Image (tube, helix red, strand yellow):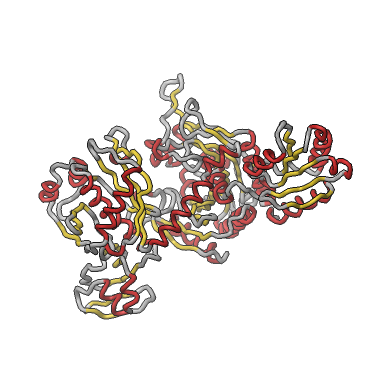
Amino acid sequence: MIQITLPDGSIKSFEQNTTPMDVAKSISEGLARNVISASFNGKTVETVTPLTTDGSLVLYTWNNNEGKTAFWHSSAHVLAQALEELYPGAKLTIGPAIDNGFYYDVDFGDHVVSDKDFKTIENKMLEIARGKHTFNMRSISKAEALETYKDNEYKTELIENLEDGTITFCDHSTFTDLCRGGHIPNTGIIKAVKILSVAGAYWRGDENNKQLTRVYGTSFPKQKELTEYLELLEEAKKRDHRKLGKELELFTFSSKVGQGLPLWLPKGAALRERLENFLKKAQKKAGYEMVVTPHIGQKELYVTSGHYAKYGEDSFQPILTPKEGEEFLLKPMNCPHHCEIYNSAQWSYKDLPKRFAEFGTVYRYEQSGELHGLTRVRGFTQDDAHIFCTPDQLDAEFKNVIDLVLYVFGSLGFENFTAQVSVRDLDNPDKYIGSVENWEKAEQAIINAATDKGLDFVVESGEAAFYGPKLDFMVKDALGRQWQLGTIQVDYNLPERFELTYKGSDNESHRPVMIHRAPFGSMERFIAILLEHTGGNFPLWLMPDQVIILSISEKYEKYAEKVLNLLENHEIRALVDHRNETIGKKIREAEMKKIPYMIIVGENEEQENKISVRQHGGEDLGSITVEAFAEIVETETNKTLKQF
């Protein structure tokens, strides 16, 4: 007999070679009908994998992320079979599950696949799925595997990098694929599929390799769920920050300037400035001091910090100067510079904590295929700050940063979020710097603070930064998509590497603890997510233009200018549409630009010294005085812009 521990802590006895599906059936037939994947002792297994030892078993359904991963991984196999049957001679490479679906990279040879072929591929996938074919894993020798794929140089390359005795194939129907495992019980669970797009992708992400065709798809256990997902995709297209950014005249890109380097237009620059001022005001109240550091630094700075060893190969290449042997790097992080600011003076425990903040622009060389609007760029500005404190101050300082992050989220409408404590991967210690003792102290400090603040958090192994663990905030937007926004990190390691000290009450030198924090993360990514979350309808206090004044005809232009001056006296951002267009066209275009309020002025308004107000979306507020309107704006601003 073997002892199986379930997630609720209960332990059940089973015969050796019992499968996860057998365990599910022993609990309930309903559970067994819904189980599609499992893990045993932390390792993904098939639902039909024989269990031969004692261990912990977790059963997954479609409602678990792990279940969806198995579902989409299995769907990728079905896609691969469909493509192989439809396009004889096509060479399959790799096809993983991804967020909300899967893809498969294929060398189609002389075949060209376009959106005209999507329906044919979908029909073939559904035909295969209806066969209810089981997924069966089997081990195979390296020699046999190489023989199987002797005509496929891509699979051959993958197999050559594997050890004999670790290679497995997955069979279903008449199809076989090189695979590590993790499948649903059978293809019949796949009820709805959709091919979403095709794109070019270099083999193994290397632009020196051949370009393949990447076929993206998604699948669901019910047609209704696919329909709902496709409707969500359509809404996401309307909210795409690249589309909205162009319509609202916020930012642009230039091939001459370079890929991944955004150019902020006047309205976008003003939006950034308001976000910066909003955070600067809160930071000032919290005791932060603003600093400014250069865009470059000597290579040795980043060697000392460890960033060069971790990011050097993937970053911009060193900048050489006329002096032999002198090298500079574009700044990949602000923290080494802030360490040197701390090192510029001698500190006592009475001086701490020191809180240095900067809106610092940093540079990372992202691959061109990974660039995406503002969410993945090569130059971006972080709302960075670093707190240098005593170990006794760490808990209070960390909790204060949590309060600041929650204030930012609340003022910008991000109400639905969870927290993630990102810790080391204990199986890969070489990924990190510093002592085990310091890591343990830092991880426990974050867990204690998150617990005391009542945060809903999970602990994720392997997601820490190379120098320390962190608390990441995972925000759900209006479309239910999850984004990582805001991060707080505890770091015992950089203070050691930079030999930072303070004099304690015992008159001895001590090492400070360092907290890294960025509530926005980066201005570029934050604005992109905020654009898509709000659909461009920012909180009133943040809108580039809060009001547009539309005159019925040229006769009332002077009165429109008078109204503009009165609004500016109330610090309301407004502009006048002077164009010789119909009032109907002006209203339609103001709606498209998502300006919160339209003020319409004509003969009646001028005679009564009032304004007619129309809200974005069509609601008419009637004829009121400018002073009454200013009170409406102030009330709405105070409602959304919370006090810190």
Quadrant location of the N terminus?
A: bottom left
Q: Is residue 509 visible?
A: no
The residue located at (79%, 47%) in the rendering is 612
40 is higher (above) or lower (below) than 169: below
Q: Which residue lies furthest to the top in this view?
A: 322
Which image quarter: residue 219? bottom left
Which image quarter: residue 426? bottom left
The residue located at (22%, 62%) in the rendering is 133
| Left or right of 405 in this view: 163 | left
Residue 429: image location, x then y, percent: 35, 52
Count of labels in the image: 0
Q: Which residue lies furthest to the right in this view?
A: 607
Query: Foreground residue, 342 or 346?
Result: 342
| Left or right of 396 in this view: 624 | right
The residue located at (56%, 51%) in the rendering is 533
Query: Foreground residue, 12 or 302?
Result: 12
Residue 177: image location, x then y, percent: 20, 52
Residue 418: image location, x then y, percent: 51, 60
Which image quarter: residue 527? top right
| Left or right of 120 in this view: 64 | right
Query: Foreground residue, 537 or 328?
Result: 537
Quadrant location of the C terminus?
A: bottom right
Query: Foreground residue, 510 or 99?
Result: 99
Q: Is residue 217 visible?
A: yes
Residue 494: image location, x then y, percent: 48, 46
